[in-house]
Amino acid sequence: MADKNKKSLHVKSGDRVVILAGKDKGKMGNVKKSIPSEAKVVVEGLNMITKSQKAQPAYGINGGLIKLEAPIDSSNVMIVCPACEKPTRVAHKEVDGKKVRVCKKCGETLDV
């Protein structure tokens, strides 16, 4: 029986993606972290939020406002193929007994 909480995403950490919706629409960046349980990804330098940080003198942490990347729903990003440099959907094929992701536009494998 499959685990109900285990989900798979079409993007993995390290993939180059373009944002399809939201305030950073059209911008490109690399996936820093993927969160499959929530179907979200964190993209480097995009979807920045400002968070209040409370001072913790015991740990040497100063208070103030900090900027950090917030997670984006994985449906709002699309992989940019390294071969053809175009945003593309992902197909799955089996190569040498291994399931790999393939570019729908040029047919090049996305997994190394």
Image (tube, rainbow, N blue to C red):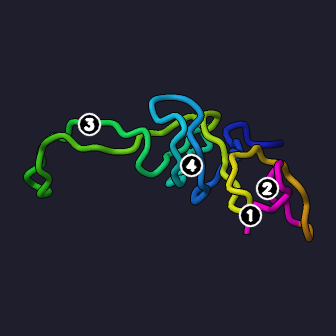
Q: Residue at x 81, y 55 (%)?
A: 102
Residue matched to label 3: 51
Residue matched to label 1: 111
Q: Can residue 38 be seen?
A: no
Circle 2 crowding by C-alpha within 10 Å: few under 14, some 14–19, many from 20: many
Q: Which residues are magenta?
A: 98-112
Mark 2 / mark 1, whichever is N-terminal = 2
**Mark pair 2, 1: CA separation:** 6 Å
Position of 14 compared to 110: left or right? left
Give the structural element (helix, strand or loop) at label 4: strand
Q: Considering only vertical position in the picture, is 60 above or below 71?
A: below
**Mark pair 3, 2: CA separation:** 36 Å
**Mark pair 4, 3: CA separation:** 21 Å
Q: Position of residue 21 (x, y in %)?
A: 56, 30
Residue matched to label 2: 101
Mark 3 / mark 2, whichever is N-terminal = 3
**Mark pair 2, 4: CA separation:** 16 Å
Magenta-drawn stretch, dominant element (helix, strand or loop)? loop
Question: Do the residues bearing badges 2 and 1 touch, measured as CB atoms within 8 Å?
Answer: yes
Q: Give the residue type at disc 1.
A: Asp
Residue matched to label 4: 34
**Mark pair 1, 4: CA separation:** 16 Å
* Res 2 label: none
Mark 2 / mark 4, whichever is N-terminal = 4
Mark 4 / mark 3, whichever is N-terminal = 4
**106 within the magenta span:** yes
Give the structural element (helix, strand or loop) at label 2: strand
